[in-house]
Image (cartoon, rainbow, N blue to C red):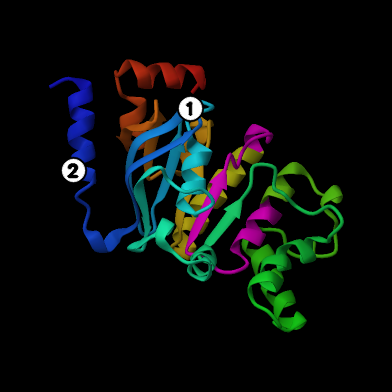
């Protein structure tokens, strides 16, 4: 049996996970922008508590896929289910409630320069939970900063932080509402190797400690090896490969080996 047949067999087995463990289910997902067909039938299951890393070349639709999962875009065909609910069929209120389960670590950290660390982390609490007492917000901020290894920096501004510290503060903000899912968008971009390893270790540690389901979008193959329970390669609008980091790295499939060479693993 050739490599692609093996991949297809593994993928069909993967789709037969116990239903109760599947938290996000993506079925035959298509999305185009004008004449540009980005996703051509994506199928993917994400199970409770796992860390899945989505890789692929620039322009392959990784960010589009994330936006479809959280309901920021609507599919042309196919469905996204979160905990059994079809995202595109949710009302505005239901969509808002669903999104409260998600935390986001953005590529550029997306901290507000005019706010202190404390105000940045507390912002989702103010937005999501009206009339929460300030002393309770302060307590949660302290707890989340402790969790990411940055106690006592509440009064600093983002301009006073290193790149790695900004990522950690942004992660503390993502954790502020105790999400069930965390999306990481290129979490190690712009960081030196030592700080990248530190962020990778934190993703892995938090996944185990908090039992959150983590979805990581990255080009960094070192991060793939460090954090992934499972890797999905997005190629030409479909999930071309799904498996463990070792299975990816040891594959002889030309599409996979070419991708790995370009990322200089």
Q: In front here: 220 or 41?
A: 41
- Magenta region: 168-194
Query: Can residue 133 be seen by looking at this rendering?
Result: yes
Q: Residue at x 33, y 44 (%)?
A: 44
Residue 150 rendering spot, x and y as whole percentages: 71, 59
Q: Residue at x 59, y 54 (%)?
A: 104
Direction from residue 37 to residue 162 in the image, left or right? right
Q: Which residue is mark 2?
A: 13
Q: Residue at x 75, y 61 (%)?
A: 120
> Farthest residue toward the front?
34
Q: Secondary structure at mark 2?
A: helix
Residue 240 in which image quadrant: top left
Q: Residue at x 38, y 18 (%)?
A: 257
Residue 114 included in the magenta stretch of the image: no
Assess whether mark 2 and mark 1 are in contact (beta carbons under 8 angstroms). no
Q: Which residue is mark 1?
A: 36
The N terminus sits in image quarter: top left
Whole-number angstrom distance, CA of label 1 to CA of label 2: 31 Å
Vertical arrangement, residue 170 with respect to residue 90, above or below: above
């Amino acid at each position: 049996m050739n490599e692609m047949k093996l991949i297809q067999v593994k993928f069909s087995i993967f789709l037969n996970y116990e239903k109760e463990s599947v938290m996000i289910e993506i079925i035959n997902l298509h999305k185009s922008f004008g004449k540009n067909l980005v996703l051509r039938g994506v199928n993917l299951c994400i199970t409770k508590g796992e860390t899945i890393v989505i890789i692929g070349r620039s322009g392959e639709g990784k960010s589009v896929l994330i936006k479809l999962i959280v309901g920021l875009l609507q599919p042309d065909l196919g469905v996204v289910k979160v905990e059994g609910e079809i995202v595109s069929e949710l009302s505005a209120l239901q969509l808002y409630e669903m999104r409260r389960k998600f935390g986001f670590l953005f590529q550029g950290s997306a901290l507000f320069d005019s706010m202190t660390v404390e105000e940045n982390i507390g912002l989702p609490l103010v937005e999501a939970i009206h009339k929460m007492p300030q002393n309770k917000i302060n307590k949660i901020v302290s707890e989340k900063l402790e969790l990411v290894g940055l106690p006592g920096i509440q009064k600093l501004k983002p301009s006073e932080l290193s790149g790695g510290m900004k990522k950690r503060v942004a992660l503390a903000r993502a954790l502020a509402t105790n999400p069930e899912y965390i999306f990481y968008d290129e979490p190690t971009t712009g960081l030196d190797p030592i700080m990248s390893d530190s962020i990778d270790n934190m993703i892995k540690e938090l996944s185990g400690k908090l039992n959150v389901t983590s979805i990581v979008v990255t080009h960094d193959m070192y991060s793939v090896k460090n954090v992934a329970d499972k890797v999905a390669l997005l190629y030409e609008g479909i999930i071309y490969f799904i498996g463990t980091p070792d299975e990816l790295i040891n594959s002889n499939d030309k599409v996979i080996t070419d991708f790995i060479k370009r990322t200089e693993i």
